[in-house]
Amino acid sequence: MVSTRPVYRPPSAPGNHRLPQSVYWRRRALVGLVSVSAAFVLYLGGTLAFALNNPTYGVSYMARAAEWGRSHGMGSVITWIETEYYKLNPPTVGGKPPASAFGHGPTSVAVPAAGHLPEPARIPTPAANPLPGEGVWHVAGRTTASGIPTIYEAFVRPNNINTSYVVGVAWMDPTLLRAQLYSGSYIPGGYHFSHSAPITAAASKTLVAAFNAGFRMQDANGGYYTDGRMILPLRKGAASVVIFKDGTMTLGAWGTKGFTMNNQIASVRQNLRLLVNNGKPVPGLANPNSIAWGKTLGGTFSVWRSGLGVTKDGAIIYVGGPALSIQDLANVLVRAGAVRAMELDINTDWVQYSVFNGPLNAPINGGNGTSLLSSMNGPPSRYFTTWWNRDFFTMSLRPSETLSKSTTSTTSKLTPAG
């Protein structure tokens, strides 16, 4: 009979059970790859958690996540997400804002007949028919020691479609105010600057307004000059805010007449191209494929936008608010009197204009500030914090306007007929 018992096999010699060396190398490579991937995910998670709890990245969590993504090489993904979001959430069509949306405060004020720019004319509404109070200017912020208004505010609807929204407009008199560019460790970054947030107690004694600057420098398609240093090379043709050493602010295309470097210039902040030139919107604003007005969202989406303009007599115009396409922004700037204008920053967290009140020649803080629009994200106090690391502009009373002067006054009516 044949036995069915297994044949006895002696145990293998020591070492004969090992797998081929290539298997072990593959295992080590896999473990290494998993470890590196886990470390990378933990790093991203940690930096995202930091960003979501860091007001420097924005007021809202959405803005903080977007800023985090762009700073970690995911700009195209963030832009796609934002684009889809705005496609699905366009501004409301039609409707009417509340009557209180068009401002408050005096519209007639006794001012000297000379020593300041002429008061602005009422802004024609971009909507079909003006509502009561629309486009009417109101005195805002600190006046001079002689009681002369330095800033006026007015409010209009952005277009004839999104008529439930209101855009804020501020008119600033550079003969009474001096401008200052405050630079940040993030924008433009890289240096210690003589003027950075927070606004000091000494500087706050004459402060009248503070407002946002432009895009991140990697998106601005322009340069930056301040403190006698060329932080980033200035681009010929770029829209440029220029501040002279005497505090006068103006803007125009760099390289054109009056906009070349000289020893009287204190700061130059560039952002994209001019929106308005010779009192008219520039050609191409309606081109949906153009990235001239910002490669992140372009110019066709109606979102929160801000812009800066200069009138023929030198007044500075700020416009900021919701439901603005790039065409709408240019249109409002022109209606407010701008002969040249440019876009500043966009999206809810970065559009912020504040005026300040309080006893003249006494320190104030963010609590003395009021946003141009109550719906602007982020309080005026952002400019008084150590963590605010973006650049911004301030307007303060010139030293000559901090002492009372004996003058003959006339009544200025800011609501002319028609």
Image (cartoon, rainbow, N blue to C red):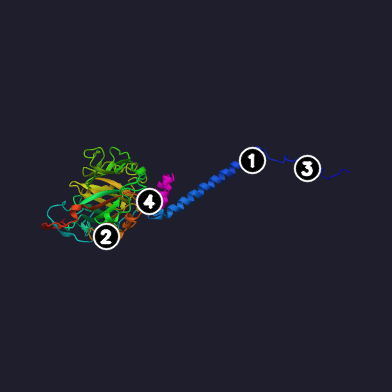
Q: Residue furthest right?
A: 1
The kind of secondary structure element at disc 1 is: helix
Q: For marks 4 and 2, give the one nearer the viewer.
A: 2
Magenta residues, start to end: 63-86
Task: Say which mark, if any, is on residue 306.
Answer: none
- What separation in Å lies between label 4 and label 2 (alpha carbons)? 24 Å
At horizontal 18% and vertical 58% (from top left) the residue drawn is 145
The kind of secondary structure element at disc 2 is: helix
Which residue is under mark 2? 101
Task: Say which mark, if any, is on residue 11.
Answer: 3
Q: For marks 2 and 1, give the one nearer the viewer.
A: 1
Which residue is under mark 4? 86
Q: Do the residues bearing badges 2 and 1 touch, measured as CB atoms within 8 Å?
A: no
Q: Amino acid at mark 2?
A: Ala
**Mark toward the start of the polypeptide (3 vs 2):** 3
Which residue is under mark 1? 24
- What separation in Å lies between label 4 and label 3 (alpha carbons)? 72 Å
| Res 280 quadrant in image | top left
Is residue 127 at all visible to an observer of this figure?
no
